[in-house]
Amino acid sequence: MATKPQAAYDRIAAANNRGFNATSNPGGLSNGGHRENFVPDLQAVVDIGTYVGEVGDELAEAASDASDSAQSASDSATSAKSAADRAAVFDPANYATKASPVFTGDPKAPTPATADNDTSIATTAFVKSAIDATKASGAELQALTSDAKFTTPKTMADAMAFVTAAATSTIAPDLSAGFNRIYTMGLNATLGQPANMKDGLPIVFYFTQDGTGSRTLSFASTYHKFPGGTVPTLSTTAFAVDRMAGICRNRGGVLVVEWSMIERDIR
């Protein structure tokens, strides 16, 4: 804070235009007093002017501080009013408690990774992803190798769908690529050892003669067994359709197909 130059004020107050006398009128300017007092009086005026300027600066700064305080007070008042407005419409019934919250509408939550296995919230997207990841496909059911997935009606239908193929000289069906098969007999063939047989697996094979007909089918006896040991023969008529149904069985460590008798010339 500016310090008032009291001595300067006192000197100016004592200045006068009467005759100078060091004892009775030390502030006089006439009768030669100006030589004694003019310069000091002038310095006193300068000191007083400097003081007045400093006081003006301080007043300006105080006014600025007051303005800032007023703006801060206004902002605080606005914030307080906003908080009051929110408090006026706040209804605890519209908010869920932290303990055992009950939500309405369609609440959202982050979706965990499919393999997540902790206490995270399971969203519907997570549940669907987890179900899809553990749902067996028709191909997986045909392979019969997974015990970690579940089946659906569609899975069963896909797995039991017939696979169509042209007969080769030695037919070696891979049951992991389809249990049920349709072969077009365009040549004489031998039904060899099926791959990926499983004990208890039911299978159905159709054999369709081509336009020539009279195609024959023999069987690898080690892997194909028939009632009474009688090996069946195919119909010979062109385009005739024969069906054989069987069950895969484990006989002493050897997987074989136990066939029922052939159903010939199905029309």
Image (spheres, grey):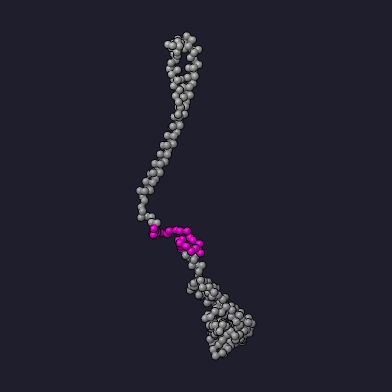
Q: Which of 126 and 106 is in front in this view?
A: 126
Decide if residue 104 is on the left or right side of residue 175.
left
Residue 257 seen anywhere in this rendered image of the structure = no
Q: Which picture quadrant has residue 59?
A: top left
At 59% from the left and 80% from the top, the residue drawn is: 194
Of the 4 image quadrants, the one containing the N terminus is top left
Q: Nearer the viewer, residue 195 or 187?
A: 195
Tell me where residue 224 appears, x and y as whole percent.
Answer: 57, 85
The answer to if 118 sits in the magenta stretch is: yes
Q: What secondary structure prevails in the magenta region?
A: loop
The answer to if 101 sits in the magenta stretch is: yes
Tell me where residue 102 appears, x and y as whole percent.
Answer: 38, 59
* The residue positioned farthest toward the top in the image shown: 31
At 50% from the left and 75% from the top, the residue drawn is: 156
Q: Which picture quadrant has residue 265?
A: bottom right
At 63% from the left and 81% from the top, the residue drawn is: 168
Tell me where residue 170 appears, x and y as whole percent.
Answer: 63, 82
Numbered circles on residues, count = 0
Tell me where residue 66 appears, x and y as whole percent.
Answer: 42, 34
At 48% from the left and 67% from the top, the residue drawn is: 131
* Residues rendered magenta in the picture: 99-124
Residue 226 seen anywhere in this rendered image of the structure = yes
Q: Is residue 27 above or below residue 132?
A: above
